[in-house]
Image: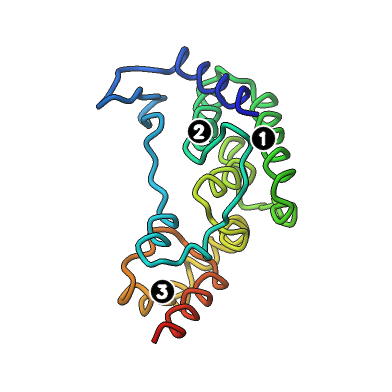
Amino acid sequence: MRDTLQNTIDHAVEKLGSEKLFGGLKIAFNDVSFRLGVHSHPAIDFAQENDMSCILGGYELPEGVDVDLLQDFAMCALFLARSGNLPQETYQNLLEQVWSGICGLNAVLNDIDLDASYYQSPYYTPLYHAIMGVGDEFNPSDIQFFLKDLPNALNDSRYKDSTKDIEAVCGTMFWRPSPETISNVRGILHRRR
């Protein structure tokens, strides 16, 4: 799988790569860009800062693949498809191939429902978001919540307020955790008292 990921990244560098920025190559399309290898992983940061690694996905990745390479791949494939340098069908097939490989190593991911009807974009698909979620080490409930329930939750004041007590103790949760993750964090904090 590493070769598939790297070949996609290399293709994006060839077609969309621009200047080197602070030691990293920038990939750009229209008004959006990112630097290869430079990612923020909010759940990982939160878990490390608060000694709560149990809230992460803890996924096994194929040999030679890490979370940054996985996210570089997904974003490069997305930019290639959006720019017309990668046919839509090829883009979808690449995402399916990578997701299948990840699920083969992590059976718990097979239960994630990728049929999220509110995604209208042919590029920002549930499959794309699921791969990015694995790269962010989001646990399965967080990935599922993002794919299925987040749009409704963002309009619900109870959800919006649900992390305030946690953030007062632990700092900001810079991702949208599922109710299950929120409950797990509260349980950890309760046991620590």
What is the quadrant of the N terminus in the image?
top right
Q: Name the residue carrying label 2.
A: 69
Q: Earlier in the sequence, mark 3 or mark 1?
A: 1
Q: Name the element at disc 2.
A: helix
- Report the amino acid beneath label 2: Leu
- Report the amino acid beneath label 1: Val
Q: How many marks?
A: 3
Give the residue displayed 43% in from the left and 55% down from the top.
Answer: 44
Give the residue displayed 41% in from the left and 74% down from the top.
Answer: 163
Q: Is residue 86 above or below residue 66?
A: above
Among all residues in the image, which is located at the extreme left?
22
How far, Cα to Cα, is label 2 from label 1? 12 Å
Q: Name the element at disc 3.
A: loop
- Report the amino acid beneath label 3: Thr
> Which quadrant of the figure has residue 20?
top left
Q: Position of residue 94 (x, y in %)?
A: 67, 29
Q: Position of residue 68 (x, y in %)?
A: 47, 37
Residue 146, numbered circle: none
- Mark 3 is surrounded, within 10 Å at the Cα level, by few (under 14), some (14 to 19) or many (20 or more) other residues, namely many
